Amino acid sequence: MLRIAVPNKGSLSEPASAMLHEAGYRQRKDRRELVLVDAENQVEFFFLRPRDIAVYVGSGRLDIGITGRDLLLDSGAQAEEIMQLGFAASTFRYATRPGTANSVKEFGGMTIATSFAGLVEKHLADNGVDASVVHLDGAVETAIQLGVAEIIADVVETGTTLRNAGLEIIGEPILESEAVVIRRTGASTEDPKVQQFLRRMQGVLVARRYVMMDYDIRAEKVEAAVALTPGLESPTISPLHHEGWVAVRSMVPSREAQRIMDDLYELGARAILTTGIHACRL
């Protein structure tokens, strides 16, 4: 049975469970459940603190897990990323009061407060900077106001919280993070159960990004229409009972669907329909 770690709370929890549900796996109905056995799919889910997931997977106790790239790298665990999941995107950056420093190279001798001490220490070492790192759990922006540190390193989304605290972002991002699937470093993914899991998750990612588009068009305009809807490999084209017309079916990116429909209509296509994709295998 495949043993999978899933975030039990925080910004990763609900999107991860929703994606697993879309992939056909049972998910817990009671947030107090710590273990869930999906016998039909031969999977056992363990609901753990997001920060701990890389440690459990890296130790080999669990086969794979879902966590954030930032949490994976900060943990120092013997685990590695094997798939990006496209949600919980965030940017990890330095910030300080205006005039304190302009780049990481100027941090020497200063103190940096963060909830991701391992990640920051590695970044400083990679840049040859000798600075002190103080680990705090949450609300690190107050560390400068209270004199605990001159610099903070934190997850930044819009930057509003930092600006409200009188801080400005410094330099390039330390890390671009998102939810990822991880496994133990060096472990094989050739296990059929792991392969099946990854195919299902990839199928959800594709289903979320694409819609199926169907339309009718005159045969002499097929090439121009297909240029607008090339599909993943090639579209399906079928002759209609009405001579000189064909029906076309193709997958198109959902974000571009309305524009493509407009262009097809201008080209002469009619009966243009889009249908959501709930699951797929490529």
Image (cartoon, helix red, strand yellow):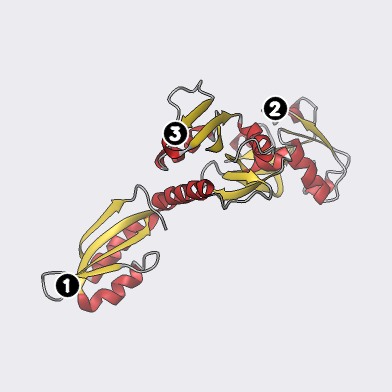
Nearest to the observer: residue 158 or residue 206: 206
Q: What secondary structure is found at the residue carrying circle 2?
A: loop
x 85%, y 47%: residue: 129
Q: What secondary structure is found at the residue carrying circle 1?
A: strand
Q: Residues within 10 Å of mark 1 (few under 14, many from 20)?
A: some
| Position of residue 200 measured from the top left corner of the image (x, y, whole percent) | 45, 48
Compute the Cα span from label 2 to label 3: 37 Å
Which quarter of the image is occupied by the C terminus? bottom left
Nearest to the observer: residue 62 or residue 247: 62
The three-letter amino acid code for the residue at tag 3 is Ala
Q: Which residue is mark 2?
A: 137
| Position of residue 80 measured from the top left corner of the image (x, y, whole percent) | 66, 47
Specify the quadrant of the image occupied by residue 25: top left
| Position of residue 139 measured from the top left corner of the image (x, y, whole percent) | 67, 28
Nearest to the observer: residue 133 or residue 213: 213
Q: Residues within 10 Å of mark 3 (few under 14, many from 20)?
A: few
In this orientation, does residue 101 appear? no
Viewer-nearest of discs 1 and 2: 1
The three-letter amino acid code for the residue at tag 2 is Asp
In this orientation, does residue 208 appear? yes
Q: Which label belongs to residue 39?
A: 3
The three-letter amino acid code for the residue at tag 1 is Trp
**In the drawing, does residue 78 fall left or right of residue 35?**
right
x 54%, y 41%: residue: 88
Q: Which residue is mark 1?
A: 245
